[in-house]
């Protein structure tokens, strides 16, 4: 086919179809030339040289080229690795702004810019053509009937987040047709949505769905794949491997259909995004996209030796967020997912790396300033994973306004408390009440804290109470990968057991963790499958396990069915009581005249905690009063919100303890709603009043709801010495 190339425009970047033809635009500051490569149905390639270059953007317009056209780029320039330049025209490259990508990278020597043989390592030049082994970009038709769909904008403090993998969630679901399992369509299926709605969550947080490098070299030959998807090839295209409708652009329509269906059910969609590095790896990695387009511009290289990369991520490279064009790439991608794909928010993987303008983390840097003033991005949910592996990378509590954070300190504190490790009551109290020590001074609210016990990276909840050590042998790295410090406890035996006492303790511990999570201030995040006892067989790093280790098992034992129903009740309970979703910080004082402060902390004997006890590492039992009448909150009409009040007794000790109702709370009846010794909520739990003593078994908790006021108990009769027959002389 003969192509007539017009000059076209330098904006927008990527391939843009206007109904009559397609404009192609690619940024490369150091290239000497760019070929647009078009592929027909037989994979025959036509190269068209882009002659126009405006502000380092190479561009051209092809009339009569439209949706479905597959393409890529070849970029000319110097191959001087010591200077940071790795141009190689023999390598077909993925457009960073491509909206759809068909297929996966096939691992072969041809995708590398250097030959595998010889002593030159990455300094050698490889002239093998990579096109047969590369996926192809696809021109798309962006039109879609959203039928009035808009972002849901559920308030952050009302949110309950559910972290799942698109494929793993539905791959084995018996009520979803086999062709749809593991796909966007599977997640949009009524059976999947019905389950999510019944659970009570408000948002699904999806592990990366951007186009990924799935067949990484170190996994080839092991029947393993990059399952989690944290090695991107592109930041605009939904991964075609999760598509049931097709890979030639249909995946874009399918993703939009999924979002629309989830929104219709009242569920938000949050994407886990990876703008800190790409799948091209370190200097020995393949040349797939940015490395061949303009390595020196897109990546952070060492100033004194640009052959090598700064690596704040542990994945071989870091994007150059010091460069304005790379900042533009990131923000263009984010806006695209909000405006064109209707995504409600983002969780930023290793977000500290995005704040490294030079070497140190600067959380008031250019990236955050851009987000803060952007009229689109400043209004969606922004969640940081507030660490990277570089020096000073642990930044929990240090992100700016508008941002929430995965609160790793919450996770560690709650694990330590319930497994019996040393941790102060003061630390527990700070995390339970929303971590004001981390977020209040920056002007943020309790919703800045994304609370979690488990996440995709680490043990599931079931494995947290079933294993002392990681068991990652299936990953092919001799169990060297994954974290060695899990803050886990197997309750007496490693892995599966038939011991009824150990099983009962594990089940109780699961409920202890879930109740603590849902009653804490902040935004609870539940790892998908924890509500049904999902296990990864002790693997705490199943990033490469695209199999039954990672997929949901929908065949539930009776114990796991009970856990599922308990979790549903617990999430509904959380939603129904505003005292567990406070917008503002506790004041520790009486606000509206109820006569009792908004929160009180007690010892088992009913006395308030002392200053000395707050710093005691061995206190494993406490009582917490949460006053539903002291919320200092109003509804959308400005009316004051009133809620129920609760008393929580926690015993993480290895023996049973007796708790006494605090004197100032003896004016009311208190009914037990939750007892983690029991598999379900209590419909008619015991009622306590006056100075009642309540026995709490080891490693369990109870939650009591305030009921009717009661008259004070009659005074105890004074017994005279004469009647007792005792002589006091």
Image (spheres, rainbow, N blue to C red):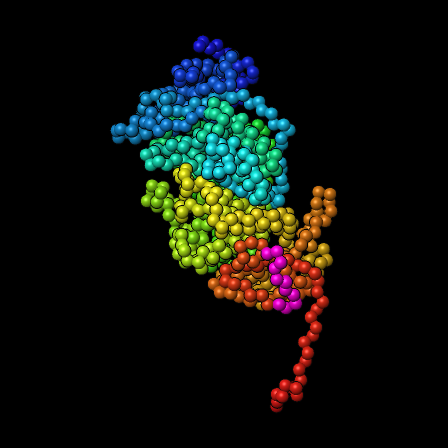
Where residue 297 appears, x then y in whole percent?
Answer: 44, 28
Q: Residue at x 35, y 43 (%)?
A: 474
Where residue 363 appears, x then y in whole percent?
Answer: 53, 41
Please identify the quarter of the rendering in which residue 192 is found: top right
Q: Residue at x 58, y 24 (%)?
A: 144
**125 lies left or right of 74:** left
Please name whichever residue, 126 or 79, is drawn nearer the observer in this view of the structure: 126
Q: Give the prevailing secondary structure in the magenta stretch.
A: loop
Q: Is residue 294 above or below residue 349?
A: above
Q: Which residues are magenta?
A: 682-692
Please name whichever residue, 272 or 383, is drawn nearer the observer in this view of the structure: 272
Q: Residue at x 45, y 19 (%)?
A: 70
**720 lies left or right of 57:** right
Judged from this view, the residue extending furthest toward the left is 118
Q: Is residue 262 above or below residue 669?
A: above
Residue 664 is at least partly visible in this image: no
Residue 340 is at least partly visible in this image: yes
Q: Residue at x 73, y 43 (%)?
A: 637
Where residue 500 appears, x then y in whole percent?
Answer: 44, 58
């Amino acid at each position: 086919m003969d192509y007539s190339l017009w000059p076209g425009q330098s904006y927008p970047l990527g391939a843009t179809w206007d109904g009559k033809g397609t404009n192609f635009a690619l940024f490369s500051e150091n290239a000497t030339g760019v070929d647009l490569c078009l592929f027909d149905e037989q994979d025959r390639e036509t190269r068209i040289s882009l002659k126009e270059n405006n502000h380092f953007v190479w561009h051209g317009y092809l009339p009569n080229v439209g949706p479905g056209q597959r393409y890529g780029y070849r970029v000319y320039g110097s191959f001087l690795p010591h200077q940071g330049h790795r141009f190689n025209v023999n390598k077909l490259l993925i457009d960073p702004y491509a909206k759809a990508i068909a297929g996966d990278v096939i691992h072969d020597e041809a995708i590398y810019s250097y030959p595998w043989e010889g002593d030159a390592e990455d300094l050698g030049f490889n002239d093998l053509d990579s096109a047969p082994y590369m996926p192809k970009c696809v021109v798309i038709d962006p039109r879609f009937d959203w039928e009035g769909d808009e972002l849901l904008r559920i308030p952050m403090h009302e949110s309950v987040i559910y972290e799942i993998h698109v494929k793993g969630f539905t791959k084995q679901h018996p009520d979803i047709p086999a062709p749809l399992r593991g796909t966007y369509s599977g997640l949009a299926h009524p059976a999947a949505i019905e389950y999510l709605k019944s659970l009570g969550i408000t948002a699904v947080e999806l592990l990366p769905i951007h186009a990924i490098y799935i067949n990484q070299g170190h996994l080839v030959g092991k029947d393993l794949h990059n399952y989690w998807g944290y090695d991107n090839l592109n930041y605009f295209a939904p991964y075609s491997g999760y598509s049931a409708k097709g890979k030639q652009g249909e995946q874009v329509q399918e993703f939009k259909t999924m979002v629309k269906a989830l929104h219709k059910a009242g569920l938000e969609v949050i994407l886990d995004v990876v703008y800190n590095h790409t799948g091209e790896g370190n200097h020995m990695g393949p040349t797939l996209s940015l490395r061949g387009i303009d390595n020196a511009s897109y990546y952070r290289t060492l100033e004194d030796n640009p052959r090598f990369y700064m690596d704040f991520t542990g994945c071989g490279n870091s994007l150059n967020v010091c460069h304005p064009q790379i900042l533009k790439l990131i923000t263009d991608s984010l806006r695209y997912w909000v405006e064109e794909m209707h995504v409600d928010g983002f969780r930023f993987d290793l977000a500290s790396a995005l704040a490294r303008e030079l070497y140190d983390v600067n959380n008031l840097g250019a990236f955050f300033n851009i987000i803060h003033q952007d009229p689109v991005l400043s209004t969606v949910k922004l969640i940081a994973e507030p660490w990277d592996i570089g020096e000073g990378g642990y930044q929990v509590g240090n992100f700016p306004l508008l941002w929430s954070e995965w609160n790793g300190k919450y996770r560690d504190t709650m694990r330590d408390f319930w497994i019996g490790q040393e941790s102060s009551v003061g630390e527990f109290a700070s995390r339970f009440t929303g971590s004001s020590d981390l977020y209040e001074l920056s002007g943020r609210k309790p919703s800045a804290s994304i609370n979690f016990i488990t996440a995709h990276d680490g043990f599931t909840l079931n494995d947290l109470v079933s294993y002392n050590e990681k068991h990652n042998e299936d990953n092919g790295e001799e169990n060297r990968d994954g974290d060695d410090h899990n803050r886990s406890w197997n309750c007496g035996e490693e892995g599966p057991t038939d011991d009824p006492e150990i099983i009962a303790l594990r089940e109780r511990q699961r409920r202890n963790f879930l109740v603590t999570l849902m009653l804490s201030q902040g935004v609870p995040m539940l790892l998908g499958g924890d509500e049904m006892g999902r296990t990864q067989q002790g693997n705490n790093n199943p990033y490469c396990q695209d199999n039954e280790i990672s997929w949901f098992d929908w065949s539930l034992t009776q114990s796991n069915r009970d856990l599922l129903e308990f979790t549903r009740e617990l999430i509904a309970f959380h939603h129904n009581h505003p005292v567990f979703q406070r917008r503002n910080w506790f004041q520790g004082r009486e606000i509206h005249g109820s006569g009792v402060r908004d929160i009180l902390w007690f010892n088992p004997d009913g006395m308030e905690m002392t200053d000395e006890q707050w710093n005691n590492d061995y206190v494993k039992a406490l009582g917490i009063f949460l006053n539903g009448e002291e919320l200092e909150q109003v509804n959308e009409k400005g009316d004051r919100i009133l809620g129920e009040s609760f008393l929580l007794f926690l015993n993480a000790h290895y023996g049973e303890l007796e708790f006494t109702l605090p004197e100032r709370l003896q004016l009311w009846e208190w009914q037990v709603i939750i007892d983690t010794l029991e598999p379900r909520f209590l419909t008619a739990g015991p009622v306590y009043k006056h100075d009642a003593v309540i026995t709490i078994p080891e490693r369990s908790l109870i939650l009591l709801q305030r009921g009717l006021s009661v008259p004070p108990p009659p005074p105890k009769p004074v017994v005279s010495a004469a009647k007792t027959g005792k002589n006091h002389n």
